Image (tube, rainbow, N blue to C red):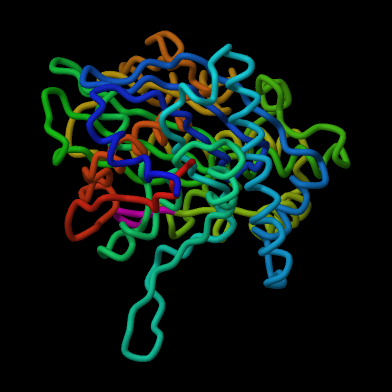
Amino acid sequence: MPKVQWPELQSKSALRVVGLMSGTSADGIDAALVDVGPRGAKLRAFAMYPYPAAVRKEVLALCAGPASVGRVCHANALLGELFAEAVIRLADKSGVSLRRIDLIGSHGQTICHLPVRRRAGRRQIRSTLQIAEPSIIAERTGITTVADFRPRDMAAGGQGAPLVPFADYVLFADDRRSRVLCNIGGIANITYLPAGGEIADVLAFDTGPGNMVIDELVRRLTNGREQFDRNGRRARASRVHEELLDELLQHPFLRRRWPKTTGREDFGAAFTQRLERRGRALRISGNDLIATATAFTCRAISRACERLPGRVDELILCGGGSRNATLVEMLRQALAPARVRIMDELGLDADAKEAVSFAILAAETIRGRPGNVPSATGARRPVVLGKIVPGR
């Protein structure tokens, strides 16, 4: 009978971990090979493996709902296979044998996130669903896999997100500078690290849409020929419609206090359809609508930073939105005199950071240590996150 691996892993001072992540944009699988030890984490290799077009279409359809249980069941197994293949391909690319990888930390693919409590009889229920079956990942790779990180925080009264603040603190806390880490994926989120602060001082929450609305508008404008506004070129050559921007900034999510999280439920296809209809009523061109959506993302982030309880010396950007030069320039103007930097400048690939975060969280889980930050999620207490599936 095979011996369970993770008690042996607990005794290792350093772990080699693959972190896996697919965000709300559902572009594909980010895979990061990370050495996690007492002095922090070091990225060894990173790759992004796009979903096949049909798979991405199906994932986005599941997110939009409603979908049959059978479709969700099938997608869970299919994505498990794709996530396992990502690990195998990354190991091959980096020249590291699978036998030399200690652990996998898989966030999976969120298809539904309902962080606001809903009444069910006498109970108040929060829920979330990530797919990409970890049992398949562990079986195909032979590597112990930690997955399904969000539900335990929700069980402890939190919103199950954001979960990256623990890794943000490990990687970027500074004694002298107050930093905001801003990940601009489909949704944008920030982590506030006050200068010299402890983990309990960290604040983090979603600010609103990141690339989600921009990308959807580009797809609609080009009939699917383009998937995103490459380098912000469409927005840069166009005009922000201030009246519509002011309307967008009245969205109730932006006015909510933290902790707060959001997703396609608030800013997905239905939101973009309403925005398009409003744009037509105001006779706004497609590219001006893209520029206005870009400004909406920027202003949602900058307003969130303005409401933080202390100064902001640096805004450090990661995620796909950090490659949008127009959005980055808007943020520099909105947040001056704070310095706006791309995470690459600090020695970590901006595209890899979320996958690195789940490698770090998996290492905490396997060592029996909490990985949530209650000041960010609203949980009653720190808890150990995730479910462990042994390798072989």
Indicate the position of residue 124 as horizontal and vertical percent values.
34, 79
Which residue: 71% across, 28% down? 229
Q: Is residue 237 magenta?
A: no
Q: Is residue 259 magenta?
A: yes
Residue 217 is left or right of residue 186, and the answer is: right
Q: Nearer the viewer, residue 181 or 365?
A: 365
Residue 83 is left or right of residue 119, and the answer is: right
Q: How many marks?
A: 0
Indicate the position of residue 275 as horizontal and vertical percent values.
68, 53
Main SS of the magenta part reads loop
Res 172 visible? no
Which residue: 27% across, 46% down? 372
Res 374 visible? yes
Indicate the position of residue 254 as horizontal and vertical percent values.
41, 52
Specify the segment rendered in magenta: 255-261
Residue 283 is left or right of residue 198, and the answer is: right
Indicate the position of residue 207 as horizontal and vertical percent values.
42, 44
Q: Nearer the viewer, residue 300 or 106?
A: 106
Which residue: 50% across, 33% down? 184
Above/below status of 363 relative to 272: above
Q: Nearer the viewer, residue 44 or 54?
A: 44
Residue 110 is left or right of residue 41, and the answer is: right
